[in-house]
Image (spheres, grey):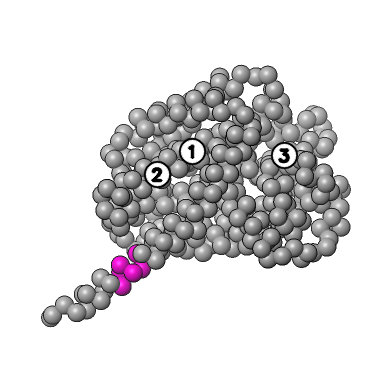
Amino acid sequence: MSNEISGKYMISPYFIIFPLYVSVVGAGIMTYQRKLMEHAGYNAWISVLLTGMSMHLILWMMYTLLSSHRDSQELMTLNRSLFGLFLGNIANLAVALYFVFGAFLKLKAYIEIVQIWFFPVMNILPLSIVIALLIYYAVSGGFRSVIGISVWATAFSFVSLFPEVILSLPFLHPLNLLPLMNHSATDILLSSKSVVLEFLGVETLLIFYPFIKTPAKSQKWAHLIMILITFLYLTFLVLAYMFFSEGQLRHAVWPTLELVSIFEVPLLQRLEYFFVSLWLIKMIAGASIYLWAACRGMKTAFRAGQRKSLIVFLIAIVILNYFMADHRTVVRVSELYGTVGFYFIYAYIPFMFVWVLIRKRVARHFEQRKPA
C-alpha cells in the first residue's frame, strides 16, 4: 500500500507525534478527573499510569501488525486480507463510522463548553457549520494539510496548558493525596477502564501508517509522545486532586476549566476565555484526523471519493450535533463510544495481532514441508 503513495504526501517519522497527540488529547482533559475518582478516589493516578503503560503494548502490537504485511499496511486492506471481502468490508464500514463518531464527540464536547460556560442562549447551529467548514478546508487539503494544522494545534495546546501548572502552584494542597494506596486492585482497574476513553485516538495510526516515510523509525516517536500524553493526564489529575477536596470534585463538571477560572493575569480577567479559544484549533485538528481516517478508509475499502465522503460525514455530524442537545444523552453516548473504543483497543487489535502471527507460522510451516 505504501508503494502507491507518492512521497510528496508522506511525512517524516518524527512528525507522527503531532497526529497522535491531537487524536488522543481532546476536550476530555477538562472533565476526566471527576470520572476517575468514582472507583479509585484519589488513588486514580495509579490507573492513569497503568493505562498509559498498556498503550505502549498496544502501539507495539500495531507496528508489528502493520509491518508484517507489505501489501496490507493499512487496517482496511488488512481486514479484507484476514476476513475476506464480505466480512472485511463490514469491518471496514464499522471502523469508518467509529472514526466519524469520534470526530462528532470531539466537536460536541467543545461546543458544549462554549455554550454552557460562555453563551448559554446561543444557537449552536451557525457555530457548528463554521467549524464544519474549517474541518472541510483542513481535510480536503490532504494528509499533509491535516498534519500542518496538527502542528499548530499541538503548539497552542502547550501554550494554554503549561502556564496553568505554574499559576496553580500557590493554591495546591498536597495533603489531599493522602492516604496513599487505600483502594483495592479491582477499584484501580475499574478506574483504568474509565480513563481509556481519554487515550482513544491512538488507533488512527492504523490508517495513516502508510503515509510515514520509513515507518519503523517512527515507532520510538510514537512511544515518546505516549509517555508525554500519560504525563500530561497524570499532571492535570494530580493538580485537580490537590486543588479540590474530594467533596468539591464530585460536583465539578469541568475541573480543569474551574481551576483556570480562578487565575488573574494582566490584561486577561477571564483566563478561561483564552484557554477555550486556543482549544478551538486543537479540536479542529483532532476532528480532522478522525475524519481524514474515515474518508481514507472509505476510499480504500469502497473506492468512494474522499471529498464526497467528507461532505456526507460533516453534514451528518452537524445534524446530529443540532438534535443531540441534552447533556445526559451526550454523556451516555460518550460512555457507549468509550466502551466500543475499549474493545477496539484491547480486544480487536490483540485479536488481529494473534491471528496474523498464527497465519505467518502456519504459512511458514507449509513452506518448509514443500518438496525441494
Return the x and y of residue 301 as percentages of the image width and height. 30, 44
Of pointers 2 and 1, the one earlier in the residue sequence: 2
What is the distance, in whole Å, between disc 2 and disc 1 at their CAs?
A: 10 Å
Q: Quadrant of the C terminus?
A: bottom left
What amino acid is found at the position of numbered circle 3 in the picture? Trp
Give the structural element (helix, strand or loop) at label 1: helix
- Residue carrying label 2: 94
Q: From where the camera sits, is residue 49 visible?
A: no
Q: Residues within 10 Å of mark 1 (few under 14, many from 20)?
A: many
Give the structural element (helix, strand or loop) at label 2: helix
Q: Is 357 colored magenta in this rendering?
A: yes
Q: Residue at x 64, y 32 (%)?
A: 327
- Residue carrying label 1: 101
Say whether residue 132 is left or right of residue 264: left
What is the distance, in whole Å, between disc 1 and disc 3 at their CAs?
A: 22 Å
Return the x and y of residue 90 as percentages of the image width and height. 33, 45
Q: Residue at x 44, y 26 (%)?
A: 315
Q: Is 168 colored magenta in this rendering?
A: no
- CB under 8 Å between callouts 2 and 1? no
Q: Is residue 174 above or below residue 289?
A: below
Of pointers 2 and 3, the one earlier in the residue sequence: 2
Say whether residue 4 is left or right of residue 200: left
Say whether residue 306 is left or right of residue 191: left
What is the distance, in whole Å, between disc 2 and disc 3 at their CAs?
A: 31 Å
- CB under 8 Å between callouts 1 and 3? no
Say whether residue 206 is left or right of residue 36: left
Give the structural element (helix, strand or loop) at label 3: loop
Segment tinted magenta in the rendering: 356-361
- Residue carrying label 3: 254
